[in-house]
Image (tube, rainbow, N blue to C red):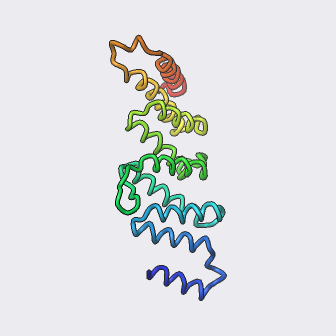
Amino acid sequence: REVKEALAQYKADFPEQIGPDLELFVLGEVQYWRDRYTKALTKYEKLLKDYPGSEYAGLALERQFAMATEYLQGRKKRILGILTLSAHEDGIEMMEKISDRAGLDEPNGVGLRAALAVAEYYETREMYNEAYLKWSEIASYWEVGPTGKRALYRMAENNLAAYNRYPPEKRWNYDASKLVTAKTYYQKYLLLYPE
């Protein structure tokens, strides 16, 4: 309440400096700190859609990244004030939107961090095919450097893990294309990074 009152006072005192983008960001922050992520997300989304060039857009993306990280780490979402449900899918969806908006071009940018978080989440859930696809997307932007090196290795590891998930005595019954793909990525890795 005090924040909303202060915002109203600032709007009255400095109407040319307080725009609707700041108001949306502040209202989103109020909901975030009250632990009402769904309402906060609504405000941040409106800010990002209506004012993509705002100086608060980057801060809103960072806040969304923090919320999505909590969802991926197991935070539940509350429905109708009574039901609590898993929010992993919401976390992935939020991270994907962040990656799309921010892009993967910046080495320390929120877009790349969101893509990495999704790839690592898939790995911890043993969703190796999905993890491979996400690492492949990252590798398409980062062919060299530490991120590219890591993505190439993770692509190989996830293909190998996807094949190795079958019982050893039955593996010969399954398609070995994942194993061949893993070998190709390992060979490329050895060629690019012999050290």
Which image quarter: residue 192?
Answer: top right
- Compared with 104, 191 (above or below) is above
Report the quarter where the N terminus lies. Answer: bottom left
Residue drawn at x 38%, y 37% is 125
Residue drawn at x 49%, y 25% is 194
**Residue 8 percent across, percent down from the top left:** 54, 84
**Residue 87 percent across, percent down from the top left:** 41, 50
Q: Is residue 178 left or right of residue 143?
A: left
Seen as rendered, the residue at the extreme bottom is: 13
How many callouts does the rendering have?
A: 0
Residue 91 or 147: which is nearer the viewer?
A: 91
Residue drawn at x 56%, y 70% is 24
Residue drawn at x 47%, y 79% is 3
Which image quarter: residue 148?
Answer: top right
- Compared with 48, 6 (above or below) is below
Q: Is residue 50 left or right of residue 156?
A: right
**Residue 120 percent across, percent down from the top left:** 43, 40
Residue 158 or 168: which is nearer the viewer?
A: 168
